[in-house]
Amino acid sequence: MDASILGMPGWFLALVAICLLVVIYSIPNDTARSLADRYVRSDQAQLLGALVAIVGFVAVAMTLYQIRVDLADRGAERAVRRDEAIARAWDRLLGQAAGNTGKGDALSTLFREGIVLNGGIDDFGVPAALDLSCQTIGNWDAQAGRCRKPAIIAGANFQARPGDVPLIALDLAGNQMNGLTLAFASLSGDFTGTGLDGLNAANARLDGHFKGAAISNADIVNTDFDIGYATPDDLPGLYGVNVSGSRMSWLEGLGFKLQQLSFWADWPPTKGKLGQGTPGFADAILDQMRICKPPLDANGKPVPRAERQPMYAGRGKPADCVAVSAAQARQLYPQAYAALPPQDFTAPD
């Protein structure tokens, strides 16, 4: 199809332009000079040029003003849409409904928009928990005093920028949380009887009450994981969990359940907490876990820790493992088992 302007085909416009050139170059020099003096170099021509310049300036100024107005309108529209999205997310999150009804996406939206996900901070700097328990948003049997059918919160993403460390505090008691991503953030609260499947936590902090909780198919790496621990009954069940580089002083209380844990041989879990050193576990404890040689890059060197794929989270089956003993791991990677200074959990490894 020919290009056209004002309904005229392109070939016609080209022909007109050629005809105009032929006519202009056919004008005698004296006549052309006279026309130039009259219409180009005359006072009237210069005045006309000045008027055209003024009109052009005014047109440009009006165009810039209209662009500014349009940008302001669009900014206002974006603000309105943001407020509406936040309102919808709160409605979906706090609505009482069992099963997967999009509450994970709602949490991700609120977090992404910078909404504080806790119930306020007390005088000691401790955040109160936002109530998302089964009793509040799930199917709760008031007569029996138990959760009949939990709300499923799937795919929530709490990935912050290094150094931000937002304080998230949630009461998820009795509900199910699948596929949570937690990075450079602190998540605390009540996880009593909560199912946490597919958790992928890195450079983060986890703490709270985990009695009766089940954490499965999870990667909890370089994370401070502290729980309200008085007796073994207070400990969560861990089923297929990578604990590489995490500070978990309560691990020894798991007993035979340690068999459900794994870690990279060059990145063992430790007992230390923030502000303390990082004492390691005895070989008798480590040998009850699955100890895997780290994956290697094309040059035969261990892949940097921050670039390693999860062992469990998001996988259909656990990652392949070349198993070694704790003694072998110490020989292969002595620096990883030496006494280390305290490590900032918010810094990427």
Image: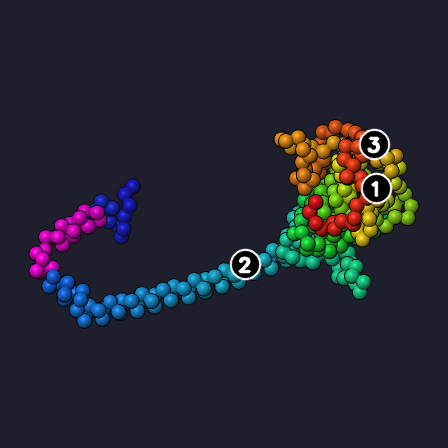
Q: Residue furthest right?
A: 231
Mark 1 surroundings: few (<14), some (14-19) or many (≥20) residues within 10 A: many
Q: Residue at x 9, y 55 (%)?
A: 27
For residue 4, which numbered disc appears in the image?
none
Quadrant location of the N terminus in the rendered image: top left
Q: Residue at x 79, y 29 (%)?
A: 324
> In this figure, which residue is indicated by the disc labeled 1?
280
Question: Magenta residues, as a range?
Answer: 13-32
The secondary structure that most of the magenta stretch takes on is helix
Q: Residue at x 14, y 66 (%)?
A: 38
The answer to whether residue 90 of the structure is visible from this angle is no
User: What amino acid is found at the position of numbered circle 1 in the picture?
Assistant: Gly
> In this figure, which residue is indicated by the disc labeled 2?
78
Magenta stretch: includes residue 40: no
Q: Position of residue 342 (x, y in %)?
A: 78, 50
> In this figure, which residue is indicated by the disc labeled 3?
327
Of helix, strand and loop, which one carries label 3? helix
Quadrant location of the C terminus in the rendered image: top right
Mark 3 surroundings: few (<14), some (14-19) or many (≥20) residues within 10 A: few
Q: Residue at x 79, y 63 (%)?
A: 122
